[in-house]
Amino acid sequence: MKLTRLLTLLVLIVSIAGAAAPAAAQANNSTPANASTATSSTATPPPTNATTEVVIGPLARVTSWSYADGTFRLTIEAKAPTLLTISESPETQSSGSGTISFTRHRLSRGTNELTVPVSNPGSDATLILSTPGSVNRGEAAFIRHSSGSALVSGPFDGADVRNSALGAALAVALGALYQVVKNRYAVHDGMERVA
């Protein structure tokens, strides 16, 4: 009986240590929000926060955006009047070809509010934004809304890792406790105990 208790205690200690290690490792490997690791030839990930500023070109930037009911609502700040080209990125699961449509909007100096309907309002919607200045620099900006169509979708953080590890540790502890109670009180699965 003492061996069972010792094994149960050992399993609990290992489970709790295992729960804390991934969350601590992930927390130590995070980078600051203002650190930029992208070069000019690679795409930076889209903002997950609708208030994140997205620079379109030298004259325009998206200061806030939202997505609801198949429509993007953009707030764009322009330093001078410029032409904004908006195209929707197609959702494809395989290779192929096709055409896309785009719209052009004349931006005036100051704050501009735009409403852009999406042609295929699915779980993922992406807009590609460019101005003549960004095209001259060989760049374009994009805004992506992803609602996560899977049962469990990310991105996951350290708290999620910790909570799942604690849940697994609790399941192991309950299984070990069941075995201890079963052995202690001689509970069996319907078979007769032979001495």
Image (cartoon, rainbow, N blue to C red):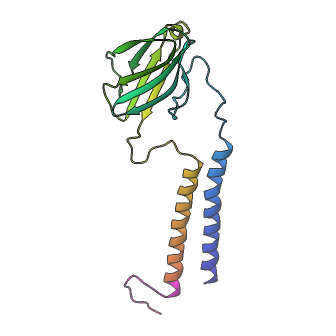
Q: Main secondary structure of the magenta part?
A: loop
Q: Is residue 159 left or right of residue 149?
A: right
Residue 89: tell me if it is visible: no
Q: How many marks?
A: 0
Region of the chain picked out in magenta, as a range: 183-193
Residue in the foreground of this view, choosing between 109 and 176:
109
**Residue 7 coordinates in the image, percent (x, y):** 62, 74
**Residue 79 coordinates in the image, percent (x, y):** 56, 12
Residue 33, picture quadrant = top right
Residue 169, picture quadrant = bottom right
Residue in the foreground of this view, choosing between 75 and 24:
75
Question: Which residue is depicted at the point 43% across and 90% down?
Answer: 193
Residue 178: tell me if it is visible: yes
Residue furthest bottom as drawn: 195
Q: Judge whether residue 176 is colored magenta.
A: no
**Residue 42 coordinates in the image, percent (x, y):** 56, 21
Question: Which residue is depicted at the point 65% across and 46% down?
Answer: 27
**Residue 113 coordinates in the image, percent (x, y):** 44, 22
Q: Is residue 20 left or right of residue 50?
A: right
Does 18 appear above or below 153?
below
Residue furthest front as drawn: 110
Q: Is residue 190 left or right of residue 176?
A: left
Question: Which residue is depicted at the point 41% across and 38% down?
Answer: 147
Residue in the foreground of this view, choosing between 53 and 23:
53
Does 46 appear above or below 112?
below
Is the N terminus in the top left, top right, bottom left or bottom right quadrant?
bottom right
Residue furthest right as drawn: 28
